[in-house]
Every structure is written in C-alpha cells, then in structure tokens.
Amino acid sequence: MRRILPLLLLLATLFPAPAQSLLARSELGPTVGGMNYLGDLNNQSMFGQVNPAAGLTARINLDPRWAISMGATYGHISGGNPDVIAHRNLSFRSPIYEAWVRAEFNFFPYGLRPGTQRRYTPFIFCGFAVFRFNPMAEYQGVWYDLQPLATEGQGTLAYPERQRYKLIETAMPFGLGLRYRINAGMHLALEYGWRLTRTDYLDDISTTYAGAAVLGGEDGGGEMAVILADRTGEVDEGFVNAVGIKRGDDSLDDWYAYFNLSLTISTEILFGWMRGKTCEIK
C-alpha cells in the first residue's frame, strides 16, 4: 500500500475535487471472498471450483458518481476432475497474486455523509491488473510446477512456434457490485468481477498433445513432463493420446473471477490524527 496510496492521490488531482478533504473522500479496508476460473478444466463453466481469496482495497471518491480504486488480491484457482470428463484425468491448481487499478461508476449519487445523496448504490467498474500465476499438478502426493516442464512441447525443436508462457501477465478486471454506507466513516460493498486475461495457460492447457518422444527428448521437459502431460493411462490402463489430438481449446484465453465483500473505513478516521496541530498559544 505504500506504493498504491501515492498513486491514488495523484489520480485524484486530475479530477475536480468536492468540498470534503481528501482524507474524508478516501477509504481503505480488507476484502474477503472466493476465486474461480473459466477455462479448459471446468468445461468453460462460469462457476467452477471456488477457492478462498482475500485482499486490500483503497478508494478515492471523486464525486457522488465516480471513484478511483486500487488494491491487491491473493487467492487460488483450480480445475479438473470431477468438473471435466474423468477419462481426460487432467487437473491443476494455481495461486493468483494480483494488483489492480480501476474506475468505478455509481448508478445513484452516493453520499459519503449521512443525509446527503443516496445511502446505497449499484455500481460498475473496469480497469487494469497485473497478476502472477503458477499452475501445478499433483502426482503421488507431490505438487509439481507445470510451466518448467513444457507439457505441450513449448521451446522444443518439434514445436518452434510454441513458446513457454509467462507467469506474469496482464488482465482487464470488470464487473458490478452494490455499495452501502453504514455511517459517515464505514462502507460495505458486495461485488463480482471477472478478469479477462491475455493467456490461455492459467491451467497449463491450450493446444494439442506433443507426445512422449518430444517431451522425453533432449530438449523436452523430461520424465515428469511425459507423466503429467497425458494422464489418461491412470484411469484407462495402457491408453495414450495420439500426437496432435486436442488437449485444450486455444480459441479462447482463460479468465478468472473474484467475488467479495469489502469493509472500508474513511482514511479521515484512520489517519486524520496524523495531521499536525496548530499551536494556539500567543
């Protein structure tokens, strides 16, 4: 937050300021909720496996309609059996570390002080996020990082067009919510936000089976890459998918979502005591 708050203050100077002080118009607080993903290992379901997530958010209310907020979120996404056909037998989990900034629009003029404007309002938001992920799979009780194994032959001579995916990517967060003013200094918000990412590898799955010859070769990921790339044999003994058979759908990038409840407190309450006091002794 040492980096987030100064940026918020800078953004606030670009807009006309209401009469209230900056501290009175700003809020800070935690968020708690759940995180899930949309991709190849949940049958493209909008509501897949949900995992706990939490974060911190800071907001500057520019006027009764507009606000700028920034924050950070940590959670997990996961997918696989039983959400997909059991015969496929692929699954994963990945942590998500996210930092974001966004603009918010209130449908009703939202009053920060009792007796002014509305006490509640639905709102929508859109912004920019940077996140880090790291898909992993479990085998015999051990979790393995999948990106270094290049399970679809990334970086091999057989597939020069397939490059290893980056673990730090950008996304566009957007969604909707409902805000409620408890009192002059405390606010509740319930929201659901999607993250439209620029990667199809949140789950380490995108294109086709590369085959054991490639993955186990000199420039392949080795024995664990062969084992974790095609796990059908674990549920159908002796079965191996042919090279070139679709392993995932590369026509759409993966998404993830975070729905949460936040409780924010006016920074006037949190930090107002830090202001210097004027000496009145003459």
Image: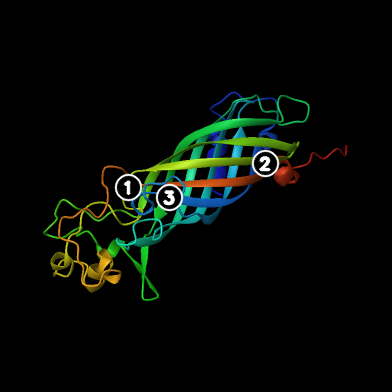
Q: Are marks 3 and 2 in contact (CB under 8 Å)?
A: no
Point out the tag, 3 or 2, that comes first from the N-terminus.
3
Q: Amino acid at mark 3?
A: Tyr
Q: Which mark is residue 199?
A: 1
Q: Is residue 201 left or right of residue 240?
A: right
Q: Label 1 to label 2, Cα distance in Å?
A: 33 Å
Q: Is residue 197 left or right of residue 269?
A: left
Rendering quarter of residue 61: top right
Rendering quarter of residue 15: top right
Residue 95, horizontal then vertical, whole percent:
44, 58
Point out the tag, 1 or 2, that comes first from the N-terminus.
2
Along the viewing direction, whichever of 281 and 162 lies nearer the viewer: 162
Above or below: residue 224 compared with residue 53: below
Q: Amino acid at mark 1?
A: Thr
Q: Nearer the viewer, mark 1 or mark 3?
A: 3
Residue linked to disc 3: 37
Q: Amino acid at mark 2?
A: Leu
Element at badge 2?
A: strand
Above or below: residue 259 compared with residue 159: above
Q: Nearer the viewer, mark 3 or mark 2?
A: 3
Along the viewing direction, whichever of 259 and 274 lies nearer the viewer: 259
Above or below: residue 23 compared with residue 87: above
Q: Label 3 to label 2, Cα distance in Å?
A: 25 Å
Q: Residue at x 58, y 31 (%)?
A: 123
Label 3: how many Cα within 10 Å (few below 14, some 14–19, many 20+):
many
Residue linked to disc 2: 188
Q: Are marks 1 and 2 in contact (CB under 8 Å)?
A: no
Element at badge 3?
A: strand
